[in-house]
Amino acid sequence: MTSRKIKKVLVANRGEIALRIMRTLREMDIRSVAVYSDVDIAMPFVRYADEAYPLSGKEARETYLEIEKIISAAKKSGADAIHPGYGFLSENSDFARESEKAGIIFIGPGAETIRLMGDKTEARKIVAGYGVPVVPGTAEVVTNLKEAADIARQIGYPVLVKAAAGGGGKGMRLVAEESELESSLRGAQSEAASAFGDGRIFIEKYVLGPRHIEFQILADFHGNVVHLFERECSIQRRHQKVVEETPSLALSPAMREEMGKAAVGAARACGYVNAGTVEFILDEDGNYYFLEMNTRLQVEHPITELTTGLDIVREQIKIAEGETISMNQESITRRGHAIECRIYAEDVYGNFLPDTGTLKSLHEPVGNGIRVDSGVESGSEISVYYDPMIAKLGVWDSTRENAIGKMIRALDDYVITGVKTTIPFCTFVMKSGPFRSGKYSTHFVQENWKVDEMNLTSLSQEALDRAVIVAATRLRGRNRSSLQTKNEGEKPSRWTNGRFEG
Ligand code: ADP
């Protein structure tokens, strides 16, 4: 590996993550190149980039998923590296291979590692061979009903049918008993075939009372692998994360150390280079099992940055340049507690279905220890074409209790009108007994978010919007009136008509 300084990076992504990557590039004095679809022409990430190239088209498959168009934009711009962000082509081994073939550094692991870890059955084999515990299940993909039924009986119900090429919770079916097996196999197979173009499925034991715990790792070309501790991501809907925190209350120091070592082992087992995440599922008795490895930057990486003080994108770039990781495991420390709430355009009272529309007004929370990773502004469109994420709201504070209080305040200060959002759900989580006590699992939504039992008034969206604006105005009024109260009995202000008369 010869080291090579990166001077210009094409960011093959959009929205908040494109902006987040470009900010670090700017801090490192590296030029940034955006690519954008027709729908995104006016988005902040396009303006923020030093250069921008159109991908012509609206749908993801003709724009952000079009390898040829992106490589050609990279060549035209003279970029010497590509950062894929998350989603889209970030875990596509062909994309990594094509960019390396064009002489452009892919900021991520090698194509072969992406391919191996992208196949959940392959990944299970590789890490199990290295001594990392995997969820009991089939070693290979299952091809017929009889074989599946035999295996499921052996493992014991409930079982999960999963897609080998799975991602985003798609192609997954929970099977409580044998009578449901056939239809679940068929359902998972066809969902996987249409979502990933690969209908191969396998069976895993369904872990009871599960908690999702993942470890952030960094690995360089020189054989150094470290972890940046865990993130707990058990608050999920449709097997997808909404709220994440670090540290996890579920881990004792001894478990943390053991799982951290297992995560580093999983990365070593596949010859991993760059930043990645090793995901585990933890059962009620404290046993942990490898779930999968995500070979890219994770949506929830900011909470690791907030607690360790590191910039993971900066680390990714330095690793891609051939640098040696400058810290060893013992020198990596973290402080305090961080929480992230994902702000999606979704109807939380209507099964978390995505919502679309124009963001009419947008006021983001600010203050000490608050981080908003957003890619939108007032007037931006949340369209049907891409993921409905509006922003990620992260908070940091010295203790978990303070961080929860800060998150509730920040969610309260967040004003978004024009689309329904996950804000009310996130506030509910922060105030709920199970979350506050730290005793929660991936069943949180099903066990606690009972819409039928809520006293929801049937306000129209327009009335809701108005209510939000009134609340926001009241908030500003409240601030003003408290200032006035403070000034009572004091000398009159020397500010008149916007000028300081002193
Ligand atoms: P994807 O790649 O589609 O995100 P994962 O394997 O990462 O799929 O699993 C997503 C989520 O599904 C996990 O965070 C967990 O909540 C649930 N899950 C996956 N496997 C199991 C299992 N064996 N037992 C219980 N829950 C599971």
Image (cartoon, rainbow, N blue to C red):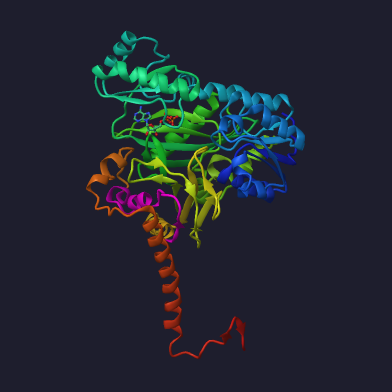
Instruction: Give the image location of residue 442, x and y in percent.
Output: 33, 38
User: Is residue 229 or residue 486 the one in the foreground?
Assistant: 486
Highlighted range, magenta: 413-437
Q: Residue at x 67, y 35 (%)?
A: 82
- For the point 47% across and 51% down, the residue is 393
- Going by the picture, which residue comes out furthest to the left? 453
Q: Position of residue 237 (x, y in %)?
A: 36, 38
Vertical side of 431 occupied by 242: above or below: above
Indicate whether 388 appears above or below 75.
below
Res. 218 image quadrant:
top right
Magenta residue check for 435:
yes
Given residues 132 and 193, the one toward you in this image is 193
On screen, residue 319 versus residue 217, left or right, reads right
Would residue 303 be found to the left or right of residue 96 on screen?
A: left
Query: Which quadrant holds the C terminus?
Result: bottom right
Picture quarter with ligand 1: top left
By secondary structure, the bulk of the magenta-drawn segment is best described as helix
- Give the total number of marks visible in the rendering: 0
Q: Nearer the viewer, residue 98 or 311?
A: 98
Q: Is residue 40 left or right of residue 482?
A: right
Name the spot of residue 22 as percent of width and height, x first: 65, 46
Q: Position of residue 179 (x, y in %)?
A: 24, 17
- 434 left or right of 312? left
Q: Is residue 421 above or below residue 157?
A: below
Does the rendering let one see residue 291? yes
